[in-house]
Image (cartoon, rainbow, N blue to C red):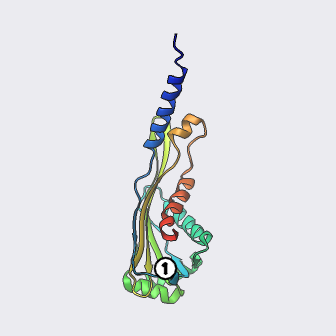
Amino acid sequence: MKDSRPIAAASIAIALLTLLGCSSNLATTEFTHPQFDFGFVERVAVLPLEDLADDRQAGVRATRVLITELLASGAVDVVEPGEVQAVADRVVRGRGVPSTKEVIELGRELGVQAVMVGSVTQSEVLRSGAVSVPVVTLDLHLLETETGAAVWAVTHTERGSGAAAKWLGTGAEPISATTRKCVQNALRSLFG
């Protein structure tokens, strides 16, 4: 009689690989202005990210992580959030993305070469039966402050551990960890 253990092990391996493959992320959409010299950017202001998700804390959470990751990169200095908010309250007349004129004024008043704006378009835990998978999507734009033009933009979606973690008994990843990975991966196209 033939031993069926190798076939069973192969079937389990294929099932796990298929399951892990199903949790892959959407392709990242990136834009980098071909003529812009990013070496010019030494100091950045990060405006609070707009929260377009059902998670009311997603914008605050992602903004804080974004500031920390920008600082940790060592590539730029980031203006303290309270100072940014105080100036933005005076300069930016509407909600959401500032106008070109407002970006230029923010640059002058804050002494920055660029302003980071964006939104959290998705921040939720998707459930399928007993499996929970956190999903976060960020849309970020870097606007230079001489002309107010966009010089870099990215939309990135990150899926946290879910089904594979459940099978392996490690539990689902918290939404905060998925947010952090999403910010890190989104910034990769900016810092290479």
Q: Which residue: 41% across, 84% down?
A: 102
Q: Amino acid at mark 1?
A: Phe
Query: Which of these two is toward me, 33 or 67?
Result: 33
Q: x, y percentage for residue 10?
A: 50, 28
Label 1 element class: helix
Residue found at the very far front of the displayed protein: 2
- Please rate how many residues cluster around mark 1, counting C-alpha atoms within 10 Å: few if below 14, some from 14 to 19, many from 20: some
Query: Which of these two is toward me, 127 or 112?
Result: 112
How many numbered circles does the render carry?
A: 1
Q: Quick check: 65 left or right of 147?
A: right
| The quarter of the displayed image where residue 73 is located | bottom right
- Residue on which the image places disc 1: 38
Q: Quick check: 15 left or right of 69?
A: left
Residue found at the very far bottom of the displayed protein: 108
Query: Which of these two is toward me, 166 or 32?
Result: 32
Q: x, y percentage for residue 27?
A: 40, 56
Q: x, y percentage for residue 113?
A: 50, 84
Q: Is residue 126 above or below residue 14?
A: below
Q: Is residue 5 above or below residue 62?
A: above
Q: Which residue: 50% across, 23% down?
A: 7
Q: Is residue 150 visible?
A: yes
Q: Which residue: 51% across, 32% down?
A: 13
Q: Is residue 51 visible?
A: no
| The quarter of the displayed image where residue 150 is located | bottom left
Q: x, y percentage for residue 112?
A: 52, 84
